[in-house]
């Protein structure tokens, strides 16, 4: 596995390219590094949303950079991978979908394994690994927020915190109109969506299997109060309600410290950009607090 870090023209933001053995191709990510370099920066792996790309995260990375420079946040390294597979709807998952040429949807790829087995170690070898899991967080927007939760729950040795911005998670099956059903991320064989596969990797299942002795996990959930609703039969599902359900489920877990913030905004960057800074401040404050227990209230 080889890694290369090249300047892109943005101030202190570079492009990292890694050859992934899992995928057999090059993986790319944008990287924000402290300038000047910091001794022990925090790390954040930031996952973009469905239909989006790493390039659309540049304003968010710039916001983190400015917050660090002003002293509002401690020094951070932010790695924002790009996931073009499955019509940019991979949900950052190792898909079991074999494809349907007639339907125009390509086979799924081992995206999660490529990110965690190839990209993450290459980035940290190139830049310098964080000093322990407590300084490594995973975050994401919408599709990326749902994946960030899954990674944090299934990789406790890697991640001590998660920042979830309008996370695409459902306590039950996703509604009929959800892109989770359309592009094979949660599929198997030639079925684009497999309910059993979805349940296998959904947070209710992962929480039910979580050991009470698991290492502590700090979670910040931030969602707007104007999330668009999806209709599922006679029911209406929206991500602000699902975020509240997730928060309630996490509160019942030993060693999970969760904070929910519902604030004015919708499913867009005018909400997510400031929410990312708030989320990083929340999980950072939990790590440095004396008792390690944050507030768990809703909007303020």
Image: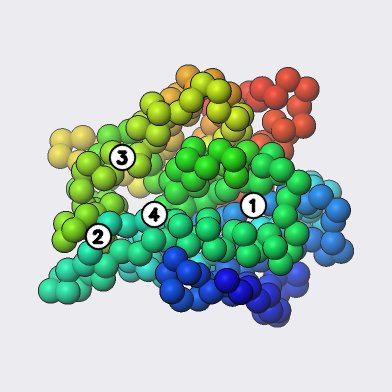
Q: Which residue is mark 3?
A: 200
Q: Position of residue 56 (x, y in %)?
A: 53, 67
Q: CA distance from mark 2 to mark 4?
A: 11 Å
Q: Position of residue 66 (x, y in %)?
A: 76, 58
Q: Which residue is mark 2?
A: 97
Which circle's residue, 1 or 3, is located before the other in the chain?
1
Mark 1 or mark 3, whichever is nearer to me = 3
CB under 8 Å between discs 4 and 3: no
Residue displayed at 56% across by 38% down: 156
Q: CA distance from mark 2 to mark 1?
A: 29 Å
Q: CA distance from mark 1 to mark 3?
A: 26 Å
CB under 8 Å between discs 4 and 1: no
Quadrant (top left, top right, bottom left, bottom right) of the N terminus: bottom right
Mark 4 or mark 1, whichever is nearer to me = 4
Q: Give the image quarter of residue 64.
A: bottom right
Q: Is residue 201 something one can see in this rendering?
A: yes
| Nearest to the observer: residue 233 or residue 6 | 6
On residue 93, which mark appears? 4
Q: Which residue is mark 1?
A: 44
Is the residue marked by circle 1 packed among few (<14), some (14-19), or many (20+) residues within 10 Å? many
């Amino acid at each position: 596995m080889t890694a290369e870090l090249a300047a892109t023209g943005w101030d202190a933001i570079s492009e990292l390219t890694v050859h992934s053995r899992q995928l057999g191709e090059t993986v790319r990510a944008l990287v924000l590094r402290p300038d000047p370099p910091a001794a022990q920066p925090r790390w954040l792996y930031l996952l973009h949303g469905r239909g989006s790309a790493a390039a659309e995260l540049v304003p968010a990375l710039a916001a983190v950079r400015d917050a660090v420079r002003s002293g509002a946040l401690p020094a951070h390294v932010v790695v924002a991978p790009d996931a073009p597979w499955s019509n940019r709807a991979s949900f950052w998952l190792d898909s079991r979908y074999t494809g349907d040429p007639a339907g125009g949807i390509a086979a799924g790829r081992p995206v999660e394994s490529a990110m965690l087995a190839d990209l993450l170690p290459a980035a940290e070898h190139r830049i310098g690994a964080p000093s322990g899991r407590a300084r490594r967080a995973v975050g994401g927007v919408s599709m990326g927020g749902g994946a960030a939760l899954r990674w944090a729950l299934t990789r406790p040795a890697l991640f001590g915190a998660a920042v979830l911005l309008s996370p695409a998670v459902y306590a039950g099956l996703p509604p009929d109109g959800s892109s989770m059903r359309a592009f094979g991320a949660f599929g198997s064989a030639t079925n684009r969506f497999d309910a059993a596969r979805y349940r296998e990797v959904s947070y209710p299942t992962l929480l039910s299997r979580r050991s009470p002795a698991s290492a502590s996990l700090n979670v910040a959930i931030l969602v707007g109060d104007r999330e668009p609703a999806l209709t599922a039969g006679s029911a209406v599902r929206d991500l602000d309600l699902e975020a509240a359900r997730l928060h309630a489920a996490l509160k019942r877990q030993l060693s999970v410290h969760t904070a929910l913030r519902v604030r004015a905004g919708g499913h867009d960057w005018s909400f997510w950009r400031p929410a990312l800074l708030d989320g990083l401040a929340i999980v950072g404050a939990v790590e440095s607090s004396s008792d390690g227990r944050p507030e768990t209230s809703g909007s303020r």
